[in-house]
Amino acid sequence: MAARAHYVTRPRGSIASVLAREQRFLSASQIHRKLRRAGERVALSTVYRTLDHLRAKGDVTARPDADGEATYLLCEPVRHHHHAICTRCGCVEDVDCEAMERFAESLRSLHGFELDGHAVEFSGRCRSCR
């Protein structure tokens, strides 16, 4: 069976554009509001389905906000990284953390524990908010 192509639909492109422009975690409803304000006619259910698709492809990462609502961030799929999230303004910085990668390797080599994956987030205040 031939592999299916992943087409960039109009909603997919619009949602990715919002996430790229904002560069912070946003909920599906926040993304939906931004799209509607920009004149896009897209259903909230389409936003959720599209975010699920982008997450499954590894193009976005998801995390719950303080109220438990899922929020989404566009990621660079070409390299593994972690996030530093400002608790005041919500901006997100990509963080390369070699120490974390060494720790994951020691779990494999010393303990025989094979990781399926890991996620690390650092929280604090960014340079602008300090």
Image (spheres, rainbow, N blue to C red):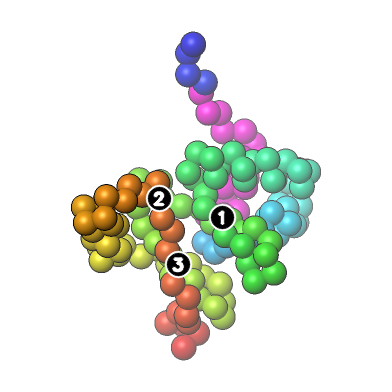
**Between 119 and 29, the one nearer to me in the picture:** 119
Percent from the top left, x then y, of residue 8? 56, 33
Crowding around mark 1 (Cα neighbors within 10 Å: few <14, some 14 to 19, many 20+) is: some
**Of the residues under marks 1 and 2, which one precedes in the sequence?**
1
Give the secondary structure at mark 2: loop
**Of the residues under marks 1 and 3, which one precedes in the sequence?**
1
As drawn, the label of residue 117 is: 2
Span highlighted in magenta in the image: 5-20
* Residue assigned mark 1: 62
Name which residue lies at 57% across and 60% down: 63
Three-letter amino acid code at the position of disc 2: Gly
Name which residue lies at 72% across and 41% down: 46
* Residue assigned mark 3: 121
Percent from the top left, x then y, of residue 71? 62, 59
Give the secondary structure at mark 3: strand
Percent from the top left, x then y, of residue 26? 62, 60
